[in-house]
Amino acid sequence: AQADAALAAGLAAGLPDGVAACHVYHMQNPYDGVELEEPSRNEETGFSYEGHPAWVRKVAAVARLYREKKPYYPTRSKRPDRLDRAKPLAPFVRVTPKKLEVVSKQNLPGCIFGLTFPKTRDELVSDEFGAEWLTKAFRAAGTLPEDNRVTRVVRAEELAVKGFDAAGGAAMKMFLTVEYLKPDPDLHTELFCKYPYLYEEYPASRREVSSYGDVDGPEIACQMSLIHLLPFRTAKYYFGDVSRETTNFILISECIKFSKRGKVENGKVVEHIDYEPYQILPVCGKYQDWLLPDPAEFYCCVFRAMGRLAAWDKLGRYDEFLGPMASWTQEQRIAEFQANRPTMTWKSIEGQAKALGKVLDTAFEFMREVVPSITRPELLKEGVLEECKAALLEMFPYFRSMSDFYQSSDSDYVAAMHANLQVDNAFFWRDEYCDLACGVLDWGGFGRSPFCMNFLGCLSGADPQLLTEHEEEIIRSFRDEYYRCGGPRLAMEEMTLRYHLGFITFVYESATWIERDVYKQEARETIATWRGEFDPDFQAAFRCRCRTMTLINAFTVFHLRLKQFKAEF
């Protein structure tokens, strides 16, 4: 009824069409919403949803709205009991690397549910924890009814940390199979666990994740408090907690069952496999877009998901978690910026330019001398990188304005965002029409931010040629879905400008990771032995692979579009 009233009010106010009226409507209760019609059968195709998981009917209903170009507003949701059981996430306490080495060996209670929890695979299956602890944890989180319990841990299998199929780079991961006393279709027996690296085995990775910022706590809080309100499918939450004293954490959720991938040879999937409607497609690793049949289609799909996420924030869907969304105009914010903008002297500019030049020179030497077989040939041509350097040195005094002040100058361009929605943080399926859709995983860093800057990380793994050819299509996928699902109507020209200005600063940022991370992960001499992007050793070195391809992709796009970037600057 509220949505209908907003629709009528918008039309009466002379808005362009009914979809624009959604921007008038703001939810008073984030759990209110419209009811989706979820039939058991698609009468148009004759496809039956009977026998499929419950989520299939919902995503089919959402897809129908998209095909029919109808608005997709927030749907009614029940507030989980766990929100009343849980304590607020305790504030982040920075633990120095030296102290982290000691305290991370301890098992202390979490700040949310007060339970001591395992920090390794062996601890989880031990008599100290095991099925009895899982029962306590799931009951505490409201996931498991009091009259049911976990009776057995059937499997606890850690995922690869290195190698072609390495499962990300921020934490240990594990498949967990359990049995319940009472089988229940609402309880998954196949689960997925995340927990931190052991300091003694992976000190550099553990320090980066646990000592220098708060990623794990907010991810757990988001999983616990928000996933039932999202506009797309995600993994069901089972339990999560973090100890602020030790930085240890555990997060247990539904395991998404990815299908088997066809045989891969020299960067190509050479074995074709047919997948059924709603069967989850094979996983695609980070910076491995060449495993996808049509990468542009997949990027458009995740950008539509991001557009829905942002639009529902504009309607108040996440206010209980993020607080009310403020609103401001570009004129108001620019006046504030001008009043508070720090001044720069020529001396400080010269000093910063010198430091920036050294960072770029290190990155250029890395591409030319260390990984020339991986670097794009066009970057190795005489004068190309020097031209890029000259342009960046000209632009750098304005980097903060380009990546900060201007990006947040208009609240229409700020909304709730997934921090890193590359294709490896999504899972995909095709429906009975063979249309692609996706769910979203990994909620570390979720929050409100200028979304054109978020696009940078999401597209950092895209092939430069693909990005150059399909950039407008991908950004338009976000813009149109943002509008259809409740956000304001944005101009493509302005969105593209904001993305490009941010991209220029991102090019420089990509160069900083050579000293900050790549050379800390692998010796220069080792990296120099890799021969090409598909070298098994390069693909196995997860962090180096990601940082290296970010650098090469960013400079390749910058080179290919340098004239346009200069004109927009």
Image (spheres, rainbow, N blue to C red):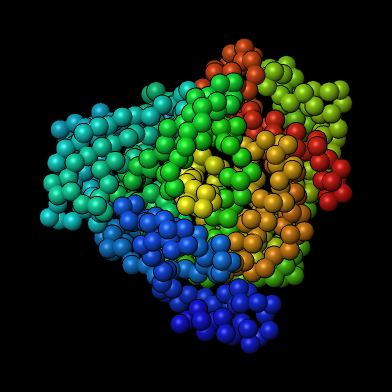
Residue 443 at what x, y percent from top left?
A: 46, 49
Q: Is residue 33 above or below residue 383?
A: below
Q: Residue at x 49, y 48 (%)?
A: 430
Of 303 and 264, nearer the camera is 264
Q: Is residue 367 left or right of residue 446?
A: right
Q: Is residue 285 left or right of residue 75?
A: right
Of 311 and 18, nearer the camera is 18
Q: Is residue 370 above or below residue 315?
A: above
Can see residue 353? no
Q: Is residue 198 left or right of residue 425?
A: left
Count every numbered label the image shows and give the total: 0
Of 466 and 155, nearer the camera is 466
Q: Is residue 267 above or below residue 526?
A: below
Can see residue 189? yes
Q: Is residue 134 left or right of residue 290?
A: left
Of 129 and 268, nearer the camera is 268
Q: Residue at x 51, y 81 (%)?
A: 4
Q: Is residue 20 above or below residue 62?
A: below
Q: Quadrant of residue 128?
A: top left
Residue 66 at what x, y percent from top left?
A: 55, 62
Q: Residue at x 68, y 22 (%)?
A: 374
Residue at the extreme bottom: 12
Q: Residue at x 67, y 80 (%)?
A: 15
Q: Quadrant of residue 551?
A: top right
Quadrant housing the N terminus: bottom left
Residue 424 at what x, y percent from top left?
A: 51, 39
Residue 112 at what x, y percent from top left?
A: 31, 53
